Amino acid sequence: MAKRMTPVLLAGALLLLLAAAGPAQAAFPGTNGRIAYESAGRSDAEIRSTNPDGTGGINLTRNSGIDDRHAAWSSDGEKVAYVSGGDEGFGSDSLSDLYVMNADGSGKTRLTESAGFSESEPTWSPDGTRIAFTRVEYHRDDMGDYFYYYETYDVYAINADGTGEVRLTDDAKGGYGPAWSPDGTRLAFASSRGTTPRTTGPEIYVMDPSPEGPSNEPVRLTATRSANTSPNWSPDGTKIVFESGRDRPRSHDFTPEIYTMKADGTEPTRLTRKGWYRDPVWSPDGKRLAFARDGIYTMKAAPLDDRNRARLVVPSEYGYENPDWQAIP
């Protein structure tokens, strides 16, 4: 029987953040379509989708015993990129690989098969030709049975047909959680590069996502004493929504709230106030946000007050997270 991976604390703080921070995508402009999200059950995780009011929910993966995570809609709303635990589960040489399926769950196609590596957090280019994703390296223990976290995590991009893979980050501290801008010229991501005693957590950067690899150095957008992760572009490309613990009294308290900032990192604005708001994404019309807490919620893309109550879309039984909103052109 295949064994699940067992992480060790080679990069403990990072691993907790990778687990807490969901994938980051771009919200492509269009009419608001369905919300895809990750449903964690007793034995596995599945990709499901629902109407924005919570009706019409369907299971897109139906992959018993294997985790399917991190759904990301293509800009035309016809495809979903996601990661799966591999054909043989987590005990196989390929831990989790990148897949693409149709919007109804049909036509599943595997794009990567990387022994000793795990893919996660896909994001589509706006023209639908490329997918950026996070890759984490693992190694076996002396028993040869389990995979363990290693220190290497980087952002890669690949053509939508599985060819032309290129590594986009090469700093020793790598990067994760990429999000493609709606105009295709920038890629936002989180990284611990450049941290100082005054900036102890991962920060959000933007870089050039050109097919031949980055042509310039990443530009840092945030600099606080707490983690800033899960960037997601607004449909018009002028703002980025993200999660952060920056207003917590202790720098090690990463209880995430949702913030927005301009695309250049200025004017950070806090939208939530009760903690553990995760995985924020814009609606295609730019008016609402979807996010995870004790279920999947939506709210107006404005500071949360008594006139802007979050609306529960899908209540959580075991754990629902990582929503992404379909754009219908």
Image (cartoon, rainbow, N blue to C red):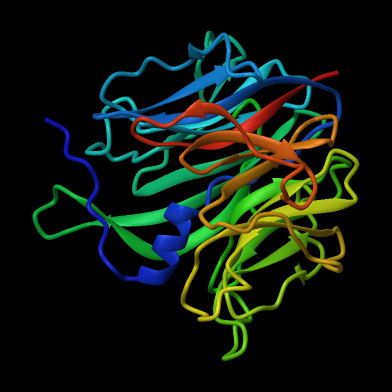
| 290 lies left or right of 265 | left
The quarter of the picture where residue 320 lies is top left
Q: Image height check: is 280 above or below 285?
A: below
Residue 56 drawn at (x, y percent):
57, 8
- Residue at 27% from the left image edge and 38% from the top image edge: 90
Q: Is residue 94 visible?
A: yes
Q: Is residue 168 visible?
A: no
Q: Residue 63 lies in what quarter of the image?
A: top left
The residue most toward the bottom is 197
| 293 or 221: nearer the viewer | 293
Identified at 68% across, 65% down, the residue is 204
Left/right placement of residue 142 relative to residue 245 reads: left
Q: Residue furthest left?
A: 143
From the top left corner, tell me how far across and down residue 65 is, in percent.
Answer: 26, 24
Q: Is residue 158 left or right of residue 66?
A: right
Q: Quadrant of the C terminus?
A: top right
Is residue 131 depicted above or below 314 in this figure? below
In this view of the protein, which residue sits in the foreground, 326 or 286? 286
Q: Which of the two residues, 5 or 139, is positioned nearer the viewer here?
A: 5
Residue 226: x and y in percent read: 57, 74
Residue 286: x %, y % from top left: 84, 36
Q: Residue at x 11, y 30 (%)?
A: 1
Q: Residue furthest front?
A: 306
Counting every numbered tag in the picture gives 0
